[in-house]
Amino acid sequence: MADEWRTMAAAVSSQLLSIPRNVRLSGMVSQLLRSPVAGITSAMVRQSRASPAPLVIITRPAGQGAGFAAQAARVFGADRVIVSPLMMTEYLPIVPRLAGFSALVLTSPAAVEAIRRDPQPLPALAYCVGARTAAEARALGLIAQSADGTAEDLMRLVTRAHDQGRVLYLHGQDIRVDLAAALNSAGIETVSALAYRQLPAPLSDSARAALAGDEPLLLPVFSPRSAQLLLAEMEAAHVRAPLHFVAISPAAAAPLRQIPACGLTIASTPDAAGVLDAMQRVEWGSASD
């Protein structure tokens, strides 16, 4: 009987090696793995078949998530990317008026979108947290300077570069660093204004199914709040899949360290390009960074 099992396992392994890299196991093979000899053939099949790309779950808000999902699809394959925003953006009228300030301080593309949705005269200058926010600010006609980093980097940019006039800090409801307080303490008159809110949204059915499945999952995380929302959703889901999180920053990574037996990588640069690069470098089974 042992010789028959070895012969069957060898035949299955031979067939699996001929399957293209990103094709899932056929129903026929799945039935075979549930057969009475599955205890032997399953292990041999897993070792023999080429590993597919992991599934990727994108949880960014819809606008930002769509662009990142397109980038991830080019790397991992369009059929390997699941888009499931954990937040919906609600934009608010901007008060006070923008024209009364010499510069804007912007920490996300959502702040730029809030300006676009509330047309009014703008100051000439915008200090931006990163390259994408700066690019979108320039599209509105602003002279944008990028800190290419975190909120702390943005604070250093403004204190170093701004010489006169009041600045307006546009932000969402949930902030990690109070830039207005920090800049006022540094002697730069700064007014804080709420420009948008990120409302929680549940994971999609396809994302929940992926969490409950067997395929490895890559989960990029772009903010501490996204990490907290993801944790809450995972508590309500039946998670079986191997997980590896890629966080944009140590702050975004911190809540994820509560999850046992998962991988965690922090991007080398705090931007979407850094996250995508780190995702491509993940080695499954490696320890957290």
Image (tube, grey):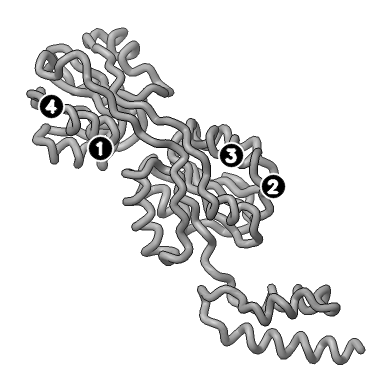
Residue assigned mark 1: 133
Between circles 4 and 3, the one closer to the viewer is: 3
Q: Is 88 or 244 nearer to us in this picture?
A: 88
Helix, strand or loop status at disc 4: strand
Helix, strand or loop status at disc 1: helix
Q: Amino acid at mark 2?
A: Ala
Q: Position of residue 221 (x, y in %)?
A: 47, 42
Q: Amino acid at mark 4?
A: Leu
Identify the disc placed on residue 125: 4
Residue assigned mark 2: 261
Q: Is residue 156 visible?
A: no
- Mark 4 or 3 closer to N-term? 4
Q: Position of residue 262 (x, y in %)?
A: 64, 48
Contact check, label 2 and label 1, Cβ < 8 Å: no
Between circles 3 and 1, the one closer to the viewer is: 3
Q: Is residue 54 above or below residue 248?
A: below
Residue 156 as seen in the image, left or right of residue 214? left
Q: Is residue 286 above or below residue 189?
A: below
Q: Label 3: few (<14), some or many (≥20) within 10 Å?
A: some
